[in-house]
Every structure is written in C-alpha cells, then in structure tokens.
Amino acid sequence: MIKKDLSVTFLGVRFENPFCLSSSPVGNCYDMCKKAYDEGWGGVVFKTIGPEHFLIDEVSPRFAMLEKESTPFIGFKNMEQIAEHTLEENLADLRRLKADYPEKVLIASIMGTNEEDWVELARLVTEAGADMIEMNLSCPQMTSHAMGSDVGANPDLCRKYSAAVKRGSSLPMMAKMTPNVTDMVEVARASLDGGADGIAAINTVKSITNLDLERKVGLPVINGKSSISGYSGKAVKPIALRFIQQLRVADGLSDLAISGIGGVETWEDAAEFILLGATTVQVTTAVMQYGYRIIEDLTNGLMHYMDEQNVDSLEELIGLANKQIIPAEELDRDYKVYPEIDLEKCINCGRCYISCYDGAHQAIDWNEETREPTCNKEKCVGCHLCALVCPVNAISMGEVVMKPGRVGNPAGKIV
C-alpha cells in the first residue's frame, strides 16, 4: 500500500490529512464527529453554533435532489439551518470531543446576529477547546436577515464581524464565503481587513432545484409551499473552483489560505481544489450520500496521485494550477485541433453526427450505408463537441493546424 505524507498545516494548525467535515448536518453532535474521527477524517467543522437567544425551528421535509437520467444526487438542496441544539449542549460536545480526541483538529463554526453575539460566541468556543474558528457568513436559508448570506454579501458587515470575532478570541479564524455574489474578492478582502486569517469557500448556492408539476410547487413541499435555499453536491464544484481561482489570483492574495468546499466526492475533486490553492477541503453532501467511510477512498486516491506526480508532501501540490488559468483574451487562438475518429472503437450510434449537426457546425459527415462518421475539415472548427458526446470515447484530439494567416509550430502546441 502506498504511503505518502497527507498532512498539511493550515493557519498554523496541523491536520493529519486535508479532509474535514464541513459545518452541516454531518457534524451535528458528539457521536457523529466521534465516528468521523474514528474513520480517519483529518478535521471536523462542527455544525454552526448560534447565540442562545436565537432559536432554530426546522421545516419537514427539508431536502431535495437534482438528478439526470439515471444519476441521482447531481445536486442537493438543503433547507436546514444551523445547529438546533442549545448553546450549552453544543459547547459541551466541543469540550468532550477535544478531551477525547486531543490530536484531531476541531473547528468551531459560529454565527451571530450582532457584534456582541460574535464576540461572545468566539470567546465561548475558545474556552471549550476549539483549535480554530470558522465564521459562517454565508448560510442561504436563515430565517433572519441579520444572519447568513445576506451578511456575507455585505463587505462592511464582514469586516465588522470579523473584527468582533478577533476581539473574542485569539484562535486562527477563517471567514466562510457565500457564492451568492458576483465578486467574492471584495467581501473576502473585507473579512481579511477585519482580522480573518483565511477564507473558506464556498457555501451553498441559492436555488430552486425542481418543482412538483402536478402540485405546481417547489421541492421539498412543506404544507403546500417551498422556498429558495442552498444547493450543494457535485454540480456546484465548477462554481467553487471558479471562486477559489479568482481569490488566489487577485492582487495581494496569491498566498491566501483557503479551505475549499463544494462538490468534493472523490480524490480527484479534492486534488482539483488543492491544485487551485486550497490547503484543506471540506465535505458534506458526499457524506450524506455514502457515509463517513469515503475517507478511505479519498486518502488512498490522493496518495496514489502524489506517487504518480513524484511528490512526497501534499503541500507541494497546493496552487500549482493557478498560473495556467488566464483571462480569456490571453488564450492562444492561432490554431485549431481536428477530431480523430477511431472506427475500431466506434459503435456507429450516430451521436456525434446528431450533436454536430444540431448543436455545432455540421462538420461530421455520415455514411448511411456503413453507418460510419468522418470529419469534414472544411467545416470543422475544432470545438470537440463530438468527442464529449461519444459514449465509447472513440473520438480524440487529432491533427493540429494553424489558422489561415497565423504562424507558429502546430506540432508544439499543447492541446
């Protein structure tokens, strides 16, 4: 079995591996977090703790999922709010977890309604033994506009509440960002200006996943009604990666400490977050679907990837992909790549022909007798939609040519 060093240091705290439960239903009490630690998770972000005066009253049911064809859980809608247990119960669980697992990382997620709440919650979770604080500035389904994503979209409040947490605690602290903004850099900078040491991104995306067409109401249905709430799962990963990339390439933020969240189900997903600059990754929806046991697949897969990349420490991979993602206007537009069709693999289904004719440039010619596709290079623009829809991967990148009037060495192009 391959063994590699998966440990990382994030905001001065050492994690045995980068995988953490995110603040959510999967880390809602002592027993759940205990099981996660026992299974091998590197850290736990305990479900967000609110002030004593703010009572949580949940709806039922509160989950829905988006599926495509036979694939469930492409996306997951969650209407649940922060921890429903009392402040006293939550603090007791934190103390017990730290006493029983002193070597494991325990992160307290907190959310207040005003400066006094943030100061007091920071003080209380510090006294309870947390190693780090995560400020939840981003939950999209709170019933109070003084909490959650409405706060996280306001730079002034992010700055003010970050400063409040720092008044209540000397622990390292990250601000958890909402994706329900156009530009995350502004609110992230405001949080850092207020005292945040790093950023967690992203929280869930405001959504309506689907409707009951007979009852004409969104899902889940609560007494004939529904509401907009948070969307998570594999479908939000591209959104999360986009925001993390934009944070890391913003002026002065190239070394920003980031905990990546959003659609991590496999070790490949985790590697993508790490290559774009995340030091730790947090998981919820995949745990809700498969259980804590996925940590074995996540760690083993990541170690095999490190072995293939000839790196001994996971930290060597952090941020290696940032420089390869550039503004669209800087991309090389001097050449195109024709598709190459392997007729030995082709099953003559016609998917490439239909997609190209109806959705691209009518550049796949179809022989009705042999049922074989060929590329018409006079029409082909090299978009490769045909390769994406091929069910047996019979289409790959082929000849590279320079566009008319352009100069260069097409054989040397990386495609």
Image: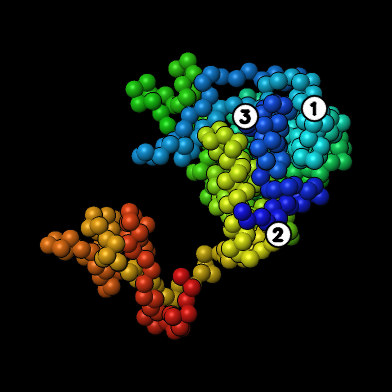
Q: Position of residue 251 (x, y in %)?
A: 70, 61
> Of tags 2 and 3, which is closer to the observer?
2
In terms of image quadrants, where is residue 264? top right
- Say which element carries label 3: helix
Can the viewer see residue 30 in this picture? yes
Label pair 1/2, CB-CB below 8 angstroms: no
Residue, x 37% and y 57% (percent of image)? 388
Is 183 situated above or below 413?
above
Give the alpha-carbon distance from disc 1 to disc 2, as whole Å.
32 Å
Amino acid type of the residue that numbered disc 3 sits on in the rendered structure = Pro
Amino acid type of the residue that numbered disc 1 sits on in the rendered structure = Arg
Task: Please tell me which of labels 2 and 3 falls first in the chain.
Answer: 3
Give whichever of 183, 269 is nearer the camera: 269
Q: Which residue is mark 1?
A: 96
Q: Which residue is mark 2?
A: 313
Q: Which residue is mark 3?
A: 25
Can the viewer see residue 125 in this picture? no
Is 151 situated above or below 308?
above
The label number, if any, that marks residue 392 in the structure image = none
Residue, x 58% and y 63% (percent of image)? 308
Residue, x 69% and y 35% (percent of image)? 38
